[in-house]
């Protein structure tokens, strides 16, 4: 984690110390389509992962609350 923060800090310092004047970049419609496709794919991926972990969380909570209701172990002796 610290290595990632150190790298990010170094790259930020380099970007501030050596700013670029003009990029003269051109974005054609294909580039815009690629950016939109990437954003939509990322959103879809986040939703799928969120759904997966939501089901696991619901299962853990359901099991914790129903264990006491079924007369199972309560953790007390």
Image (tube, rainbow, N blue to C red):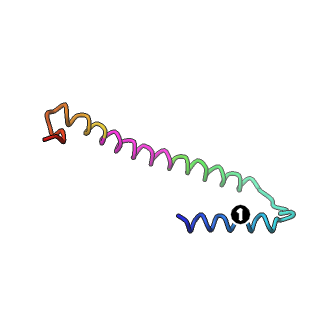
Q: Is residue 54 magenta?
A: yes
Quick one: quadrant of the C terminus? top left
Q: Nearer the viewer, residue 11 or 36?
A: 11
25 left or right of 41 in image: right
Q: Is residue 53 magenta?
A: yes
Residue at mark 1: 12
In x, y percent, where is residue 42?
Answer: 55, 51
- Under tag 1, what secondary structure? helix
42 left or right of 21 in image: left
Q: Nearer the viewer, residue 41 or 20?
A: 20
Crowding around mark 1 (Cα neighbors within 10 Å: few <14, some 14 to 19, many 20+) is few
Image point 71% across, 56% down: which residue? Answer: 31
Q: Nearer the viewer, residue 52 or 29?
A: 52
In x, y percent, where is residue 68?
Answer: 19, 34
> In the figure, residue 24 lies in which quadrant?
bottom right
- How many labels were placed on the picture? 1
Residues drawn in magenta: 46-60
In x, y percent, where is residue 29?
Answer: 74, 52
3 left or right of 76 in image: right
Q: Main secondary structure of the magenta part?
A: helix
Position of residue 20 relative to residue 62, above or below, is: below
Image point 76% across, 65% down: which residue? Answer: 15
Image point 64% across, 64% down: which residue? Answer: 8
In x, y percent, where is residue 7?
Answer: 62, 68
């Amino acid at each position: 984690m610290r290595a990632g923060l150190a790298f990010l800090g170094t790259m930020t310092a380099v970007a501030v110390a050596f700013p670029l004047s003009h990029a003269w970049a051109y974005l054609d419609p294909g580039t815009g389509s690629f950016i939109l496709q990437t954003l939509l794919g990322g959103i879809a991926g986040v939703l799928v992962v969120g759904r997966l972990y939501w089901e696991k969380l619901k299962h853990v909570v359901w099991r914790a609350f129903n264990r006491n209701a079924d007369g199972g172990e309560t953790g007390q002796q």
